[in-house]
Amino acid sequence: MGSRNFKDLLAWQKSMDLVTACYKLTANFPASERYGLTDQLRRAAVSIPANIAEGQGRQYDAEFVRFLYIASGSLAELETHIQIAQRLDFLDQVSGDQLLEQCLEVNRLLHGLILFQKKKLDS
């Protein structure tokens, strides 16, 4: 796997930016959602870079791929929470769409990283 650190991975960096954006936007959610959608959205967002980091820290490429898939699942969950927040008018259309655009970028990076790691496994 080499000596790369998870902090060097663009997927991790961009997912950290996504976490920051999610925290800032959910700060304006209704107080009644503090333990509901706010918490779920933040947990899903945090799970993405956390799983990238944990997977990178494992000794085997196959483990890394497994954690990248978990991060990808958390990303899909986050996208769903964002769309729910938009439907409930907790997020305005523009802010929600910007978050979803960040999600798409992270998704592309995760997918590319998964393909790269799987190719290393096959060789």
Image (cartoon, grey):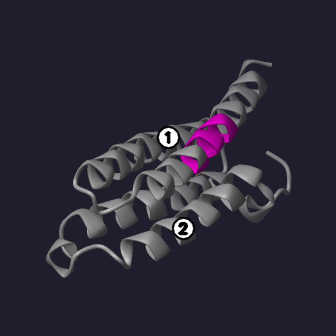
Placement of 108 over or under 44, stated as above or below: above
Residue 93: give its label: none
In the rendered structure, which amino acid carries the disc numbered 2?
Ala
- Residue located 73% across and 18% down the image: 122
The residue furthest right is 3
Choose top left, top right, bottom left or bottom right for residue 41. bottom left
Answer with left or right where residue 54 lies relative to residue 117.
left
In the rendered structure, which amino acid carries the disc numbered 1?
Ser
- The quadrant the C terminus occupies is top right
Q: Position of residue 24 (x, y in %)?
A: 48, 75
Residues 70 and 88: in front is 88
Q: Main secondary structure of the magenta part?
A: helix
Residue at numbered disc 1: 72
Q: Position of residue 85 (x, y in %)?
A: 29, 55
Placement of 29 over or under 69, stated as above or below: below
Residue 3 can be seen in this image: yes
- Residue located 19% across and 73% down the image: 35
Q: Nearer the viewer, mark 2 or mark 1?
A: 2
In the image, which residues are magenta?
A: 102-110
Residue 64 can be seen in this image: no
Residue 21: give its label: 2
Label 2 sits on a secondary structure element that is helix
- Residue located 40% across and 50% down the image: 78
